[in-house]
Amino acid sequence: MAMNLRLRDDQTDALKQRAEQEGTSMHAIVLKAVDDYLARTAQEAIVRKTAMAQAAKWHELMERLK
């Protein structure tokens, strides 16, 4: 799927400079950033779901310990 990405001028300049430093393309850096974001937020969602399940499981005990 094609899409347009509009960056501020400072973002474009920084991205271009980083791509040159790393010897890669701006496109490759953006794809890596998206992959990293998706992996990180997926992990956060798993942790959040597990925490909610454990909080519900142990709610009664925690209330008694207050």
Image (spheres, grey):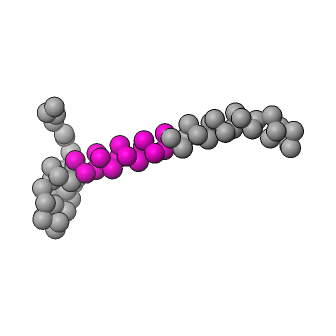
In the rendered image, residue 61, in percent from the top left (x then y), is placed at 82, 39
Q: Main secondary structure of the magenta part?
A: helix
Does the magenta portion include 36?
Answer: yes
Name the one closer to the observer, 13 or 42. 42
Q: Can residue 50 be seen at all in this image of the molecule?
A: yes
In the rendered image, residue 35, in percent from the top left (x then y), is placed at 29, 47
Quarter of the image with the N terminus in it: top left
The part of the image, by quadrant, that contains residue 19 is: bottom left
* Residue that protrudes farthest toward the bottom in the picture: 21
The part of the image, by quadrant, that contains residue 57 is: top right
Using residue 44 as the reference point, say whether residue 65 is left or right of it.
Answer: right
Using residue 31 as the reference point, say whether residue 39 is left or right of it.
Answer: right
Q: Can residue 17 be seen at all in this image of the molecule?
A: no
The part of the image, by quadrant, that contains residue 16 is: bottom left
- What residue is rendered at 61% in x and 41% in y? 51
Q: Which residues are magenta?
A: 31-45
In the rendered image, residue 18, in percent from the top left (x then y), is placed at 19, 62
In the rendered image, residue 53, in percent from the top left (x then y), is placed at 63, 35
Using residue 48 as the reference point, say whether residue 61 is left or right of it.
Answer: right
Name the one closer to the observer, 31 or 14. 31
- What residue is rendered at 22% in x and 47% in y? 31
Does the magenta portion include 55?
Answer: no
- What residue is rendered at 35% in x and 43% in y? 38
Image position of 28 with respect to 53: above or below = below
